[in-house]
C-alpha cells in the first residue's frame, strides 16, 4: 500500500521506541535497567488521584469544551500567576492531550510551507518531526558544551532570515538539562523583540532546576512579547502524571483559538478526569514537587560524578530536567561484533546488549557523539546500571 507522502519525512519517536524496546526485552525475561525513560519514576501524588476519583464519582465523564473546562483554565491562570508572574484571561488559555499535543496544535496553527522554525540543538526529538508534519522547516541552531549547550543572542541574530517564523525555547532542556540565566534570556529576548519571531516557550521542566538561581519567565522579563509568545506546559513531568495526558498553553487569543479549531477536528477535549486531576495538581499542595526535585538533584550529582570517572566519557553538569547528556565519542573505535563502534547509536546498542542498560542514542536529539541518560530512576538502579556500563566499557577497551 502507498502511504501518504508525509510518512517519508517523519520517524517514530526514538525516546518512546527505547521504552517499547525495554518492555519487549523484559517480556522475554531479560533484565534491563532503563535509563531511557523520560518520565518521573514517582507515582502521581495521592491528593491528585483522589481528585480524579471524586470527579469520576461525580459523573464528570462527559465531553467538555474542546479546550478544557473553565475550571481547569482558571487553575492554569492561577498557576501562571503564582509561579511565573504572568497574567492571562480565559480565552488566552487552552488544554490538550499532553504537552506534545499542545506543541502539535501550536505548530499546526503557526507554520506552513516555507516557514522556518528555529530550534536550538541538541533538541527534544519531537520538535523537528512535528514541525515537518505541520509543513514547516526546522532550522537547527547548534550548540556545544562550550556554550553550556545554550544559544547566544548573537547566534540567534545571525540565524534570522526572511523565512524565520518561530523560535522554540526549552529551558531547562531535554536532553541536555541546560537552563538559561536571566541575563542570557534577556539578551535573547532583545533579539526576539527586534525581529518578527513568534516564540514558543516549552516550560515542562521548569520545576526541575537545581542549584541555578530561579529565573524569571522570558515573558515576565520582556512583557512586550505578549502578542508573540506561547507558554507551553504540561502536568506530566511536574506532577508525575505522564500517563494522564494533560498539557496546556497560554498565549495570544488568536493562536489559542486556532489551536482549539485544530483540536476540535482531531481529539476534541482532553480527558475530562485528567482535567479534574490537573486542577488539583496545579492549585493543591505543591510539596511533592519539591520532594521530587530534591531527589533528582541528588541523583544528578551521583550520575555526573560516576560518568566523569569513566575513561572516554565527559559530562557537563546539567542545571535542570532529569537528564545528563554525556559525550561518549572518546569510547568510539574498538570493535564489537566485527565492526568498530563509531556512533552514539552503536554505543547505545552495545550497552543494551552487553551491559543490559537502555539509554537513548544522541542521534535523535541531533548529536551522534552523545547519549542521553535519564536519572528518573532509583538510586539503586543508577548505581547498578552505572556499574554495568563501567564494566562493559572496560571489556570493550580491553582494559
Ligand atoms: N517537551 C519536552 C521537552 C519533553 O521532554 C516532553 C516529554 N515528552 C514534552 C514536551 C511533552 O510531554 P507530555 O506530552 O507528556 O506532556
Ligand atoms: N519527553 C520524554 C522523553 O524525552 C518522554 C517520551 C517522549 O514523549 O518523547 O523521553
Image: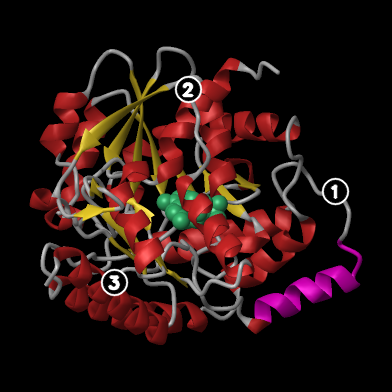
Mark closer to the observer (3, 2):
3
What residue sits right under mark 2 in the picture?
A: 111
Badge 2 element: loop
What is the span of residues highlighted in magenta in the rendered image?
A: 47-60
Query: What x and y, as percent, mark residue 162?
Result: 28, 13
Query: Going by the picture, which residue comes out furthest to the bottom?
Result: 380
Q: Residues within 10 Å of mark 2 (few under 14, many from 20)?
A: some
Mark nearer the N terminus (2 vs 1): 1
Query: What x and y, as percent, mark residue 365?
Result: 34, 44
What residue sits right under mark 1 in the picture?
A: 63
The C terminus lies in quadrant: bottom left
Q: Residues within 10 Å of mark 3 (few under 14, many from 20)?
A: many
C-alpha separation, residue under disc 1 versus residue under disc 3? 48 Å
Vertical relation: 144 (above or below) 359 = above
Query: Going by the picture, which residue comes out furthest to the left?
Result: 146
144 lies left or right of 15: left
Residue drawn at x 42%, y 48% as measured from the top left: 202
Q: Of helix, strand and loop, which mostly describes the magenta segment?
A: helix
Residue drawn at x 61%, y 67% as measured from the top left: 28
Query: Which mark is on residue 389?
Result: 3
C-alpha separation, residue under disc 2 versus residue under disc 1? 29 Å
Query: What x and y, as percent, mark residue 2?
Result: 67, 16
Q: Residues within 10 Å of mark 1 (few under 14, many from 20)?
A: few
Amino acid at each position: 500500500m502507498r502511504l501518504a507522502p508525509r510518512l517519508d519525512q517523519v520517524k517514530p519517536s526514538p525516546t518512546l521506541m527505547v521504552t517499547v524496546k525495554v518492555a519487549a526485552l523484559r517480556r522475554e525475561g531479560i533484565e534491563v535497567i532503563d535509563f531511557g525513560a523520560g518520565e518521573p519514576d514517582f507515582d502521581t501524588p495521592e491528593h491528585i488521584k483522589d481528585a480524579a476519583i471524586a470527579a469520576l464519582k461525580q459523573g464528570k465523564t462527559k465531553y467538555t469544551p474542546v479546550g478544557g473546562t473553565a475550571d481547569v483554565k482558571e487553575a492554569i491562570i492561577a498557576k501562571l500567576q503564582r509561579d511565573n508572574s504572568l497574567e492571562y484571561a480565559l480565552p488566552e488559555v487552552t488544554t490538550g492531550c499532553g504537552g506534545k499535543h499542545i506543541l502539535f496544535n501550536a505548530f499546526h496553527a503557526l507554520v506552513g510551507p516555507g516557514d522556518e522554525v528555529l530550534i536550538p540543538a541538541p533538541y527534544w526529538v519531537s520538535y523537528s518531526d512535528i514541525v515537518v508534519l505541520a509543513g514547516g522547516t526546522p532550522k537547527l541552531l547548534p550548540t556545544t558544551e562550550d556554550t553550556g549547550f545554550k544559544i547566544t543572542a548573537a547566534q540567534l541574530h545571525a540565524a534570522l532570515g526572511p523565512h524565520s517564523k518561530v523560535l522554540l525555547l526549552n529551558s531547562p532542556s531535554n536532553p541536555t538539562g541546560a537552563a538559561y540565566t536571566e541575563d542570557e534570556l534577556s539578551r535573547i529576548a532583545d533579539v526576539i523583540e527586534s525581529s518578527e519571531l513568534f516564540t514558543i516557550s516549552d516550560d515542562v521542566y521548569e520545576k526541575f532546576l537545581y542549584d541555578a538561581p530561579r529565573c524569571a519567565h522570558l515573558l515576565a522579563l520582556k512583557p512586550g512579547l505578549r502578542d508573540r509568545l506561547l507558554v507551553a506546559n504540561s502536568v506530566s513531568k511536574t506532577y508525575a502524571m505522564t500517563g494522564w495526558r494533560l498539557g496546556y498553553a497560554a498565549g495570544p487569543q488568536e493562536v489559542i483559538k486556532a489551536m482549539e479549531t485544530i483540536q476540535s477536528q482531531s481529539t476534541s477535549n482532553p480527558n475530562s478526569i485528567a482535567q479534574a486531576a490537573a486542577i488539583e495538581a496545579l492549585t493543591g499542595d505543591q510539596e511533592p514537587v519539591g520532594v521530587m526535585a530534591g531527589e533528582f538533584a541528588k541523583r544528578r550529582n551521583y550520575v555526573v560524578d560516576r560518568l566523569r570517572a569513566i575513561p572516554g566519557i565527559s559530562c557537563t553538569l546539567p542545571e535542570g530536567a532529569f537528564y545528563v547528556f554525556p559525550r561518549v565519542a572518546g569510547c568510539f573505535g574498538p570493535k564489537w561484533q566485527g565492526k568498530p563502534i563509531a556512533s552514539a547509536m552503536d554505543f547505545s546498542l552495545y550497552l543494551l546488549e552487553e551491559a543490559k542498560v537502555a539509554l537513548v542514542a544522541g542521534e535523535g536529539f541531533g548529536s551522534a557523539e552523545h547519549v542521553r541518560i535519564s536519572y528518573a530512576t532509583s538510586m539503586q538502579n543508577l548505581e547498578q546500571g552505572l556499574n554495568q556500563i563501567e564494566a562493559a566499557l572496560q571489556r570493550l577497551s580491553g582494559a
